[in-house]
Every structure is written in structure tokens, then in C-alpha cells.
Amino acid sequence: MDEDTHILLRQGWRWSLKPVYFMGFNISWLVMEEVFISPFDHQKYPFTEAMHLARFYQAWLNLQRKLS
């Protein structure tokens, strides 16, 4: 796993694999898609979207701490 993946994992995101469908057929025996499960809404996101959301959530949490 690369450094960016470890950043997500340290922030509480979970790593998982999602089956891939092609023309309605499950081809997970051939390929699986890497996804990250958000600790905030428990939805599955691809890596790039997870990194974007992690930055947003981290900024929001920092703001909440400053206001407290």
C-alpha cells in the first residue's frame, strides 16, 4: 500500500474490495475494484474521491475543534 492509502487508514477509513460488473455479469473472479469505506457516512468511495472527502472532513473536524 502506498503512503496515501495509509493516510486514509490512519483517519479511520476502511479498505475493501468491490466486485466489478461488465455488461451485467459479475467478473470479480477476474478483477476487483479497490474502495474505501468512510468512517463518517459508511459509504464506499473510490480512492480519488475518498482522498478528496478525507481532506474535507479533516478540515471540518479541525474547525470544530477550534470553535469548541
Image (cartoon, rainbow, N blue to C red):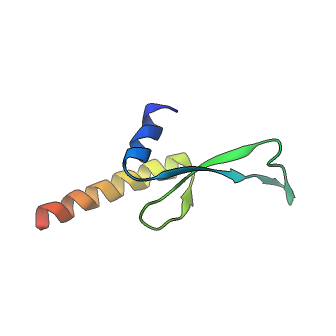
The residue that appears at 37% across and 50% down in the rendered structure is 11
On screen, residue 68 versus residue 27, left or right, reads left
What x and y, as percent, mark residue 5? 47, 39
Q: Quadrant of residue 56?
A: bottom left
Q: Position of residue 14 (x, y in %)?
A: 50, 52
- Whether 17 is drawn above or below 57: the answer is above
Q: Position of residue 15 (x, y in %)?
A: 54, 48
In the picture as drawn, the residue positioned furthest to the top comes out as 2
In the displayed structure, would residue 5 be above or below residue 53? above
Q: Is residue 40 left or right of residue 61?
A: right
User: Could you tell me which residue is drawn at 43 percent across and 61 percent down?
Assistant: 39
Would you identify the image quadrant in which residue 45 lies?
bottom right
Q: Nearer the viewer, residue 16 or 24?
A: 16
Q: Quadrant of the C terminus?
A: bottom left
- Residue 6 is left or right of residue 23, and the answer is left
Residue pictured at 27% horizontal, 55% vertical: 59
**Marker count (numbered):** 0
42 or 62, nearer to the observer: 42
